[in-house]
Image (spheres, rainbow, N blue to C red):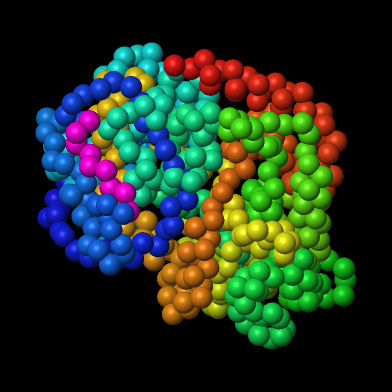
Amino acid sequence: MRKKFEIISAILALLMIVSVFASCAGSKTDETTQAAVTDATPEASVGDEETTYSADNVIQATDLENHVFKILSPVHDWAIVEMTCEDITGDQIKDAICERQARVEERLNCKIEETVLGSNYADRIRTVAKGGSEDAFDLAQMTTYDAYALFLEGYLADMAKIDSMNLENPWWEKRFNDEVNLAGRRYIAFGNESLIFYSSFYLFVFNKEMVVNYSLDDPYELVASKQWTWDKAYEMMKVVADDGQDGSCDPGTDDVLGIVGHVNHSRNLIFSSGISICQRDDENMLTYDGLSQNYIDAFAKFTRYFITDSAAAISGCSHNKYAGYTGQSGLKNYISVFVEGKSLFLTTGTNEIITIRESPTEYGIVVVPMYSADQESYVTPVYSAAEGIVIPEATLDTERSGLFAEAMGAYSYRNIIDKHINVVLHYRVANDPTAIEMINLAYANGLIDVAMAHNFGQCTTLLNNLNVNGIAEVTRVFDQVKTPMKNALKDARDKLAARP
């Protein structure tokens, strides 16, 4: 049985995550749940970083008569997906999840159950809705494109209309939510209650010993001076790359690479340029009239530098010898190359840093480089298929579900996310304050290509196919889907306007 916790008031860790995105809410009104959440803007209840924060000051004690809140979650090996936990195990992150569950259950007099489903969770929402509200989920974690489709079909609530939710609260990622949702709707929300989002940011990891041995520029200093660009990273890659004079870097040899990663990263990493597939109009809707020349040029350069160059080993690319490679470390694919000290750079998602924590290679962590030095700021690409929170319409009471979502966020704030960052990312760089600054900078600048998040015109699929085949010319393929893309965006505008 899950152990019960005492509710402890303590000064929690400094806030590591800068709020990046937000705004949401649903339909039915209940006076009890409506009044159960106190606004908690940083200026009001939360205060500055030196102030003791207590979720009990935000979430009022409410008797929900042992209502069972049901959560639907996906399965991933690259992220912590579970929102519940059965027992204290000594694992800091899972124990924090367990503590949150106990505190929410006590505060709201409720129970929490979670169903973890490997696939087809959008279909599960449809099926349950047709079967009756008693089996409905109160919350679900799903991708933006699934949430968008289900919202248009009437299966999900517009969280901007749920009075028990205040998505200005600091545990919601306001900037990101504003960006990813269209037409002022809130069919999906990202925030502190789920670790999937915080596992979905991309970073560059570098081999510190190689930087010294090859007399390379310090990546930390390059970031600070805004000279950390694709050109600079590529220049450094070419300095260290050693193919043994045979023109090919081969697995299982002493050949040294400039960069290793996975093809699934590539289509997202391109967005570190800040250049998106579509544009925005005055109504915050996406528009498309073909790819901009800037995007075309950025895509070609990224492909040449970081996918097809001989100094790059990108697992999953059809032309690459490192797909399926298992090195002496026992780790498969690209990660083993970096762990064994045979690559200068590694591209990876934030949670996957856990796979290299015990590496003998001393590493540093930096933000993804900018496309060019005249770029306004660094952009941390977020995985386009990262799951956020949705509230199904089939639940008996969307206001009650909204209260539950707020409680899960409030009891996560300055707690679970901080522990995740500390355990996964700070583990090997705890005595490297600059690396910690890089991690904070990365989380403060996370953005997503919204067209990719919705997969309009199958754009995500197209980009992935180009990356897999190492094709740098993007124009021809996207010209072929120009009309379907425009039709998809017009359809989105019309249907979102018509949706109650």
Name the residue rendered at 47%, 50% in the picture.
20
User: Residue 188's quadrant in the figure?
Assistant: top left
Whether residue 355 is visible here, answered yes or no, is no
State the quadrant of the C terminus.
top left
Question: Where does the image place residue 157, in percent across and percent down from the top left?
Answer: 39, 24
Q: Specify whether residue 35 is painted magenta.
A: yes
User: Residue 211's quadrant in the figure?
Assistant: bottom right
Q: Which residues are magenta?
A: 34-42
Q: Specify whether residue 98 is painted magenta.
A: no
| In the rendered image, the vertical position of residue 333 relative to residue 58, given as above or below | below
Whether residue 168 is visible here, answered yes or no, is yes
User: Residue 54's quadrant in the figure?
Assistant: bottom left
Question: Where does the image place residue 68, in percent across and percent down from the top left?
Answer: 21, 31
Question: Where does the image place residue 149, in percent across and percent down from the top left?
Answer: 53, 24
Question: Where does the image place residue 334, in percent across and percent down from the top left?
Answer: 64, 61
**Relative horizontal placement of residue 221, taking residue 61 as reference (left or right):** right
**Relative horizontal placement of residue 90, taking residue 21 as reference (left or right):** left
